[in-house]
Amino acid sequence: MYVMRDCCACSRICYLGDRLLTSASVTVDGVMMCTKNETGPMFHKFCTVGINETTCDPYFEKHEAHTKPGIPGLSSGVFYRMSYTLK
């Protein structure tokens, strides 16, 4: 039998507009950074910084980043870290 520990209370997933982003694309050193901040991983994924200008993907420019409560997918490893087997 598998039991989930309060994952819905603490797990969040990151969106850009209505697009779900992978945990890997918004995580740095184990911390989710669901922000369009220039120092964050999302900015570096969607923008190219040149000598005199920065060019970003049009979708990135038009939409806000936000989180929602949710359970990350199986490939993220969160499901397995938050579950355990009862005997």
Image (cartoon, rainbow, N blue to C red):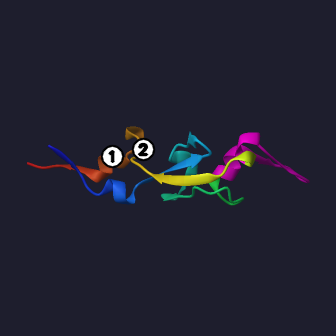
Furthest residue toward right: 52
Instruction: Verify CB contact (< 8 Å) between mark 1 and mark 2.
Output: yes
The quadrant the N terminus occupies is: top left
The mark total stands at 2
Q: Which amino acid does label 2 sit on?
A: Ser
Magenta span of residues: 42-60
Seen in the image, is 54 located left or right of residue 68? right
Q: In this view, does 21 lie above or below 41?
A: above
Q: What residue type is labelled 1?
A: Phe
Q: Which of 63 and 71 is in front in this view?
A: 63
Q: Mark 1 points at which residue?
A: 79
- Residue at the spot x=52%, y=43% of the render? 22
Which element carries disc 1, helix, strand or loop?
Answer: helix
Which element carries disc 2, helix, strand or loop?
Answer: helix
- Residue at the spot x=56%, y=47% of the render? 15
Where is residue 69 shown, x and y percent of the image?
43, 53
Furthest residue toward left: 87
Q: In this view, does 66 lie above or below 20?
A: below
Whether 57 is among the magenta residues is: yes
Seen in the image, is 75 located left or right of residue 87? right
- Give the crowd class for mark 2: few <14, some 14-19, many >=20 residues within 10 Å: few
Where is residue 86 shown, x and y percent of the image?
12, 49
- Residue at the spot x=41%, y=41% of the render? 73
Q: Name the residue under label 2.
A: 76
Whether 61 is among the magenta residues is: no
Q: Which of 5 and 51 is in front in this view?
A: 5
